[in-house]
């Protein structure tokens, strides 16, 4: 099983343009949530570890996970409201967000017992590693499970508006890296963080996504592999990076490469296949509004 740990929320996505107050369509979302759904749709055995509200939005979020085949037995429940993210879609389909997260359920996540023996990898990222007190619980989960030998993926998916002290966050981010097997960054993330981390003591591999310019992996052993983006007419980019996370984990699991040693052993051809698969999956997500990652059958052939 691959477990995804982090927040779920409701994206409020504007419909149409040309008006200062467009109608907002609620869609299931949150970076970790989207990653879990994408993994489930790809056919991976997946679990979600979070705290989800008992309100109507929370019920819809759990239903979305179950419909994708995601195990929700690690989900905590609480009466607090669901986080809302109001999206603003740019002319190129890129999305920016304003968050309504004060006192919401996912912020009150508590460290669970050790994850089941069947878990081989855990993915982390986005708001859940910023908003306290849950952020400290997710950080403790990352360190504990990495210490137990599990493969870890981190996608910080930086949201500057949620980070009150940029310098403190950057220092905290650097402190996570020894416990991260695979780091995924967007080009915007890398610029905000001050560069792409690498070298001894850090992740075994770093994947950098560059939107329409494709993506690149750099391994600790010095291998660098790039693939172009898959051509697509973009509806919006919501969930594209989350789909990349899922496709990377799915591709690595299919090659029995969910360990730092196995990651280091992958050659250029294997990375080209994994990255190309992730690019195709992300392109399908970009082709439709909201975070709607593809199903396995849409990527066959």
Image: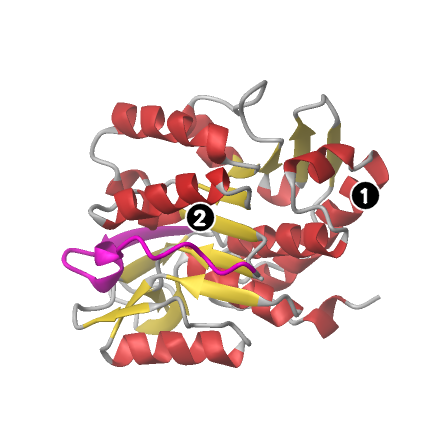
Who is closer to the viewer here, 65 or 110?
110
Considering the image in quadrants, where does the C terminus appear? bottom right
* Above or below, comparing residue 19 to residue 132 in the picture: below
Magenta run includes residue 105: yes
Left or right of 33 on screen, residue 293: right
Q: Quadrant of residue 149?
A: top right
Q: Quadrant of residue 182?
A: top right
* Above or below, comparing residue 223 to residue 93 in the picture: above
Q: Secondary structure at mark 2?
A: strand
* Mark 1 lies on residue: 270
Q: Residue at x 62, y 31 (%)?
A: 204
Residue 124: assigned label: 2
Q: Visible in this render: residue 220?
A: yes
Magenta span of residues: 95-117
Q: Residue 12 at x, y = what percent? A: 32, 66
- Marks 2 and 1, the one that precedes in the sequence: 2
Q: Residue at x 33, y 57 (%)?
A: 112
Q: Residue 285 at x, y = what percent? A: 58, 62
Q: Visible in this render: residue 230?
A: no
Q: Residue 293 at x, y = what percent? A: 57, 66
Q: Secondary structure at mark 1?
A: helix
Q: Residues within 10 Å of mark 2 (few under 14, many from 20)?
A: many
Q: Residue at x 30, y 73 (%)?
A: 23
Who is closer to the viewer here, 162 or 68?
68
């Amino acid at each position: 099983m691959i477990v995804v740990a982090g927040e779920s929320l409701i994206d409020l996505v504007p419909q149409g343009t040309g008006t200062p107050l467009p109608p907002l369509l609620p869609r299931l979302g949150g970076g970790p949530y989207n990653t879990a759904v994408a993994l489930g749709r790809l056919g991976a055995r997946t679990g979600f570890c979070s705290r989800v509200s008992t309100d109507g939005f929370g019920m819809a979020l759990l239903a979305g996970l179950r419909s994708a085949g995601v195990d929700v037995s690690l989900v905590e429940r609480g009466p607090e409201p669901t986080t809302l993210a109001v999206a603003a879609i740019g002319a190129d389909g890129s999305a920016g967000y304003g968050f309504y997260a004060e006192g919401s359920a996912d912020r009150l996540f508590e460290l669970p017992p050790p994850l089941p023996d069947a878990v081989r990898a855990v993915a982390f990222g986005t708001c859940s590693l910023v908003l306290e007190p849950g952020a400290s619980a997710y950080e403790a989960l990352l360190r504990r499970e990495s210490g137990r030998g599990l493969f870890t993926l981190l996608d910080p998916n930086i949201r500057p508006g949620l980070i009150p002290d940029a310098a403190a966050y950057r220092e905290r981010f650097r402190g996570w890296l020894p416990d991260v097997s695979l780091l995924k960054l967007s080009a915007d993330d890398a610029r905000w963080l001050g560069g792409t981390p690498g070298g001894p003591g850090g992740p075994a591999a770093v994947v950098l996504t560059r939107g329409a310019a494709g993506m690149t992996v750099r391994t600790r052993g010095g291998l660098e592999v790039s693939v172009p983006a898959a051509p697509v007419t973009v509806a919006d980019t919501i969930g594209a990076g989350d789909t990349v996370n899922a496709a990377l984990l799915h591709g690595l699991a299919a090659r029995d490469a969910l360990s730092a040693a196995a990651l280091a052993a992958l050659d250029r051809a294997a990375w080209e296949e994994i990255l190309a698969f992730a690019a195709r999956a992300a392109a399908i997500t970009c082709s439709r509004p909201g975070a709607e990652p593809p199903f396995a059958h849409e990527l066959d052939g």
